[in-house]
Image (cartoon, rainbow, N blue to C red):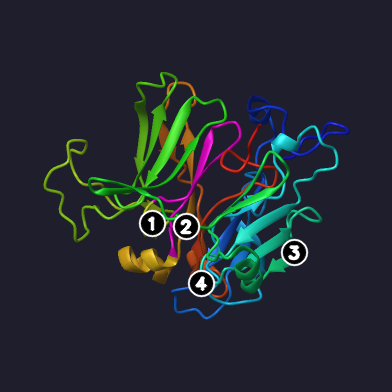
Amino acid sequence: MASTCSGCGPGYKTPLDAMKGPREEIVYLPCIYRNTDIQKPDYLATVDVNPQSPNFCKVIHRLPMPNRKDELHHSGWNACSSCYDDPSKRRNRLILPSLMSSRIYVVDVGTDPRTPRLHKIVEPIDLFWKCGLANPHTSHCLGSGQIMIKIRHSFTHVFLAIGLITDILISLDDRFLYFSNWLHGDIRQYDITDRRNPRMVGQVFLGGSILKDGPVKVLEDKELDSQPTPRILKGKRVQGGPQMLQLSLDGRRLYVTTSLYSAWDKQFYPDLVKEGSVMMQIDVDTDKGGLKLNENFLVDFGAEPDGPALAHELRYPGGDCTSDIWL
């Protein structure tokens, strides 16, 4: 997915150039065992998302961390498209913070993208004594070629009536905005070409806490005629609600996982912790707007070899809508 031009740096010259890039073939996801009954370390999963591959929708590699109860969280890159003109830069390291242990793992995804390997560990004592900080939440590459790690005020989610917005992204052409509503259970697509007047043009329910057969009864909702039905995908009921989002570079495929944070998963959706999270794919109408679940796509992290895992954020090897910048 990286640029193929000679003598240039990582990524793409512009966001519109990125939209013309090759289709994603693999994705990386941190998988969490903290707050579950499984006493195993978290790991980085590599998932095959190429429809032409015999391993389509399968985890093809797992990189376990050397410690337990890290709570891996939001990863980022060592370089971004802002370094496109710098041939000395490469996007070959995934920076993976651990929210609870305060470790930061640096993962080599450049040597062999399909089998990532651990490159370096920044231990919590180094983070504390050198920075006076702890609990790293998110890493992000900067235009300068440096790496920013967010630590303070990380859990800023937006609460609305019967809802909790936990992730948001904008397509690379700035036409559509998407957000996930983890408690309500829906993903929404807005046309934002008129910046002052966003229009909702797509919506799909994928689980959530207000399902027809659940314990919550909705007394009034101006948007819904009835409570949504449970989502069954390839024979598996989707537990939890839509959470982390990632859009394909061309804007036609929206990927979603269902775990937010293991402690909150356990509190709001205990069956999610017992059965594991899932990864789904939504087909996007990029002409008029619209969202439709791909019924043939499911990655079930409840079927992992060591037991059900909580898969979180998604990353493409060559950069994506939520991790790349152009400055």
Q: Is residue 318 left or right of residue 165?
A: right
Q: Earlier in the sequence, mark 3 or mark 4?
A: 4
Q: Is residue 139 left or right of residue 220?
A: right
Of residue 194 and residue 176, the one placed in the foreground of this image is 194
Helix, strand or loop status at disc 3:
strand
Q: Identity of the amino acid at label 3? A: Arg
Mark seen at residue 33: 4
Q: Residue lying furthest top in this view?
A: 194
Residue at (50%, 67%) from the top-left corner? 309
Of residue 108 and residue 140, the one placed in the foreground of this image is 140
Mark seen at residue 278: 2
Crowd class of label 2 (few under 14; some 14 to 19; many from 20; radius 10 Å): many
Q: Identity of the amino acid at label 2? A: Val
Residue at (38%, 64%) from the top-left corner? 265
Helix, strand or loop status at disc 2:
strand
- How far apart marks 3 and 2 lie (CA) works out to 24 Å
Give above or below for 221 relative to 263. above
Stretch in magenta: 242-261
Q: Identity of the amino acid at label 4? A: Tyr
**Which residue, given by chain and number where applicable, does mark 1 sit on?**
238
Residue at (43%, 58%) from the top-left corner? 260
Measured as percent of width and height from the top left, residue 24 is found at: 65, 42
**Which residue, given by chain and number where applicable, does mark 3 sit on?**
117
CB within 8 Å, label 2 to label 1: yes
- How far apart marks 3 and 1 lie (CA) works out to 31 Å
In front: mark 1 or mark 4? Answer: 4
